[in-house]
Amino acid sequence: MTGSFVKRIMKSLCAAHGMRSSSSLAKVKVGTDILSIAPNVSLQRARTWDQGVASNFLTTPLVDIFKDKKVVIFGIPVGYILEFSMLHFQVLEGAFTGVCSEEHVPTYMDNADKFKAKGIDFVICVAINDPYTMNEWAEKLQGNDTIEFYGDFDGSFHRSLKLATDLSNVLLGTRSERWSAYVVDGVIKALNVEEDPSVVTVSAAQTILEQI
C-alpha cells in the first residue's frame, strides 16, 4: 500500500471522526509526572513468542523505564498486524504503516548517536500493540540495535496519558496519537502531539533533539 494512499485514508478518518491531536487536548503536559498519573502501568518490551514464554510474560513497570533516567519516547498510531496460529506467526503490514515505517521511526534510528551524545539513556518507540508484533516490526526495520520498542498491549499507558484515540466506529479499536516526549526522571520536559496523525512534523526526532 503506497504512502500517499495511506495518508488519504488517515486524513479521511480525521475529517470524518474528528481525530485531533494536540497537547491542549492531552491530560499530560510539560511538567507532568508520568509515574504519578500511571503508577501501576507497565509496558511490554518487544520480544519473540518464545522469549515471552521463557520470561513468564514479564512486563516492564514504568518506574523501571523512567526512574532516574533521561528518556525520549514516541508513539505511533499503527504498527503491524500479527496473524497467529499454533504453528507460526505471520506479520502483515498495517493499513497506515507506511508513515510509521518510512517517515517516523527512521528519524529516530538515524539520530540515535545524537541522542546518546545528549545523555539520553533510552529512545523508545511505543504503540498500542502486542510485544511480539512490535518485535517482528522492529526486526523488519532493523531498528533493534538503535532504539527500543515496547508494546502497550491493552492501551493502558496511552489512556493514562490521554494519548489514545478511539476508532471503534471504523473497526480499528483504540489507537495511539502520533506523539513524542522528552522525559527526565518520569517528568515530561517536552511534549509534541501531531494535529494530523497522518503526517510526521512536530513528533519527528529533529524536533525533540532541539528540545533537549
Image (spheres, rainbow, N blue to C red):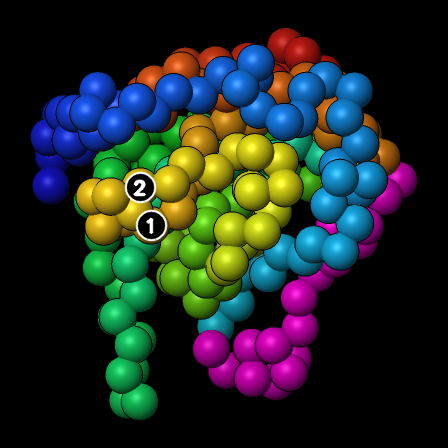
From the image, which quarter does the C terminus lie in?
top right
Residue drawn at point x = 56 percent, y = 77 percent: 52
Image position of 195 (left or right of 110): left
In terms of secondary structure, where does tag 1 sit? Answer: strand
Image vertical order of residue 180 relative to residue 201, above or below: below
Residue closest to the far top: 210
Image vertical order of residue 16 relative to residue 195, above or below: below
Amino acid on which the number 2 mark rests in the picture: Leu
Residue closest to the far bottom: 86
Residue drawn at point x = 29 percent, y = 77 percent: 84
Q: Earlier in the sequence, mark 2 or mark 1?
A: 2
Near-viewer residue (181 or 146):
181
Image position of 159 (left or right of 198): right
From the image, which quarter does the N terminus lie in?
top left
Q: Which mark is residue 173?
A: 1
Amino acid on which the number 1 mark rests in the picture: Gly
Residue 51: in magenta span? yes
Instruction: Pinpoint residue 166: horizontal percent, then vertical percent.
Output: 38, 41
Residue drawn at point x = 27 percent, y = 83 percent: 85
Q: Which residue is mark 2?
A: 167
Instruction: Pinpoint residue 13: horizontal percent, then vertical percent.
Output: 21, 29
In terms of secondary structure, where does tag 2 sit? Answer: strand
Residue 105: in magenta span? no
Q: Are marks 2 and 1 in contact (CB under 8 Å)?
A: yes
